[in-house]
Amino acid sequence: MDRAALVTGGSSGIGLAIATMLREEGFALTLAARTRAKVEAAAASLNAQAVTADVAREDDCRRLVDEHRETHGRLDLLVNSAGVGIAGRVLQAGAAMRQHRVPRFVAVDHEADAHAVAFQRQHLGVVPADERAERGGLHRAGIPPS
C-alpha cells in the first residue's frame, strides 16, 4: 500500500470508524488500544496490524511507533483517538475521582499527544526527504477533548 496510518483508540468508537474509512481509502493500518482482545478483533476485521498499548505511557508510544515502522516502513497519518471519559461534574466529584480519574484523563487525552509529536518527528526519517516534501510531511488528526 502507498499510504500507512496509525490509529490510537482504534478498537472501538470514533477511532474504529476512522480506521474503517482509512482502510476503504486504501491505507495500510496499525490500530492501537489498551485491551488486547478488542484491538485484535478490530484489526482482524480490517486486515490491520494490532498493537496493545497505553498511549499515556511513553515507552508504549515508542514501542507502538517502532512496531508500526517495522511493519509498514512509513507513517503518513497519525490519528490520536485514544481517550478516557469522566462521568459527572469534576467539582462535585469525590477525592478518589480527583486523585485517580482526572490524572488518567490528562495523561491519555493530553500527554499522549506530546508523546505522539515526539515520536512522529523521530519517524519522519523513514520517508525520504524528497517524498516528504512532495506529500507535505506527516499529517496528524486528533479528536479534541470536549
Image (cartoon, rainbow, N blue to C red):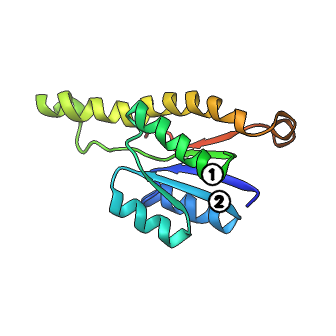
The quarter of the displayed image where residue 21 is located? bottom right
Do tag 1 and tag 2 residues touch (Cβ < 8 Å)?
yes
- Residue 28: give its label: 2
| Between 103 and 61, the one nearer to me in the picture | 61
Q: Position of residue 6 (x, y in %)?
A: 57, 49
Question: Would residue 94 be seen by someone viewing this image from the given angle?
Answer: no
Q: Amino acid at mark 1?
A: Ala
Q: Is residue 120 visible?
A: yes
Question: Which amino acid, by three-letter code, is at mark 2?
Answer: Ala
| Total numbered labels | 2
Image quadrant occupied by the C terminus: top left
Q: Which mark is residue 5?
A: 1
Q: Nearer the viewer, residue 28 or 102?
A: 28
Question: Residue 1, percent across and down?
Answer: 73, 61
Q: Residue at x 43, y 59 (%)?
A: 11
Does 112 appear above or below 13?
A: above
Splitting the image into 4 quarters, where does residue 75 fall? top right
| CA separation in Å, label 1 and label 2 | 6 Å
- Say which residue appears at 50% left-offset and 27% top-offset: 114
- Considering every residue shown, the one lying at the far bottom of the view is 45
